[in-house]
Amino acid sequence: MRAGIRMRGGQVRSLPVLRHSDEQAEILWVAICDDELIQVVGRGRGVNRIADNPLEVQILADVALPQVYDTIGTWDLERPDLVQRMLLAGVAVDSPTNATTLHPGLFANAEQAKKAFERIGFKGQNPLKTSCREMSLKSARYRRPGRGQSWHRAWWVEGDGRDVRGKLEDALGCLVGWTLEQGG
């Protein structure tokens, strides 16, 4: 089923939504779920904000609430990419092998991580995509011990270099090289 929503510019847009086939069940659904989302939006106290500090609300659901929308999108366009998911978990790295150890929930093995890196065109270059450009990323170069080990890069959003180095060493073992690059 489709529902209409009002956009800030005055247009009405249509989007697919889930609806229950039983009218009474739909009323209960709206009272429990949709109305709860409306209440959550109100908790941001947008009326207490000023133009320099507006309230931004992002609703990630397949609902059509009686709100005015600036933009609508699909989850396929909005969902975090691979680098963002690593950043959300604390630290992103450019090594598929190290990424597998650091993020076992994202990758089953190093080969899967390598293929995922290749799919997004991440070959050890700067991971910044348009969605990451708004983030203030901190970065460092690191090297693991052992013959033939090359330098790798790590990026993170929160914390300082000591915290991230500790996180890397907890997962990967001792690091023989660590150089902060930006913001760390």
Image (tube, grey):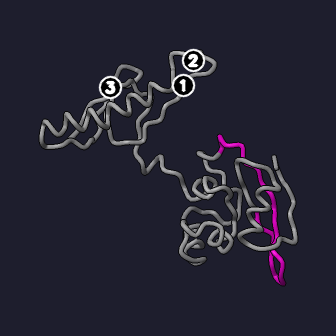
State the quadrant of the N terminus.
Answer: top left
Q: Residue at x 71, y 61 (%)?
A: 125
Q: Give the residue pinned by disc 2.
A: 49
The reply to whether the magenta stretch includes residue 143 is: yes
Q: Earlier in the sequence, mark 1 or mark 2?
A: 2
Location of residue 43 in the rendering, given as x and y in whole percent from the top left corner: 48, 26
Which residue is pictured at 62% across the width and 21% down the height? 53
User: Is residue 42 found left or right of 159 in the rendered image?
Assistant: left
Residue 123, compared with residue 39, is above or below; it is: below
The crowd level at tag 1 (other Cα within 10 Å; few <14, some 14-19, many 20+) is some
Residue beneath disc 3: 66
162 up-or-down from 144: above or below? above
Q: Nearer the viewer, residue 104 or 17?
A: 104
The residue nearer to you, when weighing 87 against 41, is 41
Horizontal arrangement in the rendering, residue 138 relative to residue 55 (left or right): right
What residue sits right under mark 1 in the picture? Answer: 55
